[in-house]
Structures are given as C-alpha cells and as structure tokens.
Image (cartoon, rainbow, N blue to C red):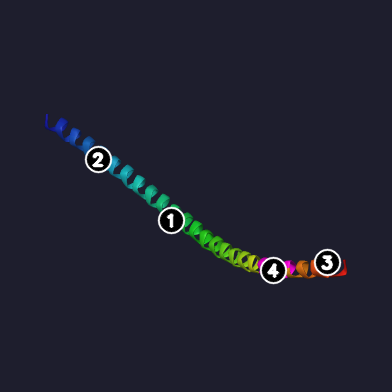
Amino acid sequence: MLQNDIANLEKQISQFEYEKKKAYDEIEKARDEIKDIAIELNQFENERLNLAEVLSIYNDEKRKADEEYVKLEVDFKFSEDNFNGAVANQN
C-alpha cells in the first residue's frame, strides 16, 4: 500500500515537473513574441516618424507653391488689365 502511494506521488511529481517545464517554455515563447513585437513596433514608429518628416517637407513645399501661385495670379491679372487697357486705348 505504501509503495503504491509512493509510486502515485512520484507520478504526480513527475507530472507536475512536466507541467512546470511546459509552462516555463510557454512563458519563454511569449517573451520572445513580445520582444519580436516590440522590435516590429519600434520599426513602425521609426517609419512613422520618417513619413511624418517627409509629409512636413511636402506640406512646406505646397505652402510655398500656393504662395507663388497667388503671386503669379496677381501678376497675371495686372498684366491682363494692362493689356486690355492698351488694346482699348488703340481702338
């Protein structure tokens, strides 16, 4: 009877050790996945920052182009008015 109890306890201990190792392996796997995800997140963040910088440059260039467009529109309107005035004076 005592030998059966000891054998059962040894089986339980063995099962516990197996479950403990399995849980440890799963924890290590989860840690590795977290580390990989953190690396990927960092890469995405770097890409986001780079794209934000590029977008800022493009927005600045657009603003300058819009300002130049307004100046050219004013200059064109002035030239058009002068031309129309000159044509009217010749008629």
Q: Position of residue 38 (x, y in %)?
A: 43, 56
In three-dimensional space, the C-alpha distance between marks 1 and 3, rounded to whole angstroms, equals 73 Å
Residue position for label 4: 74
Q: Residue at x 80, y 66 (%)?
A: 84
Q: Is residue 38 left or right of residue 66?
A: left
User: What amino acid is found at the position of numbered circle 3 in the picture?
Assistant: Ala
Mark positioned earlier in the residue sequence (4 or 2): 2
- Are the residues at dot 2 and dot 1 in contact (C-beta closer than 8 Å)? no
Q: Residues within 10 Å of mark 3 (few under 14, many from 20)?
A: few
Residue position for label 1: 38
Mark positioned earlier in the residue sequence (2 or 1): 2
Q: Position of residue 90 (x, y in %)?
A: 87, 69
Q: Dot 2 lies on which element? A: helix
Q: Position of residue 6 (x, y in %)?
A: 16, 35
In three-dimensional space, the C-alpha distance between marks 3 and 4, rounded to whole angstroms, equals 21 Å
Numbered circle sitting on residue 16:
2
Q: Is residue 17 magenta?
A: no
In three-dimensional space, the C-alpha distance between marks 4 and 1, rounded to whole angstroms, equals 53 Å
Q: Quadrant of residue 73?
A: bottom right
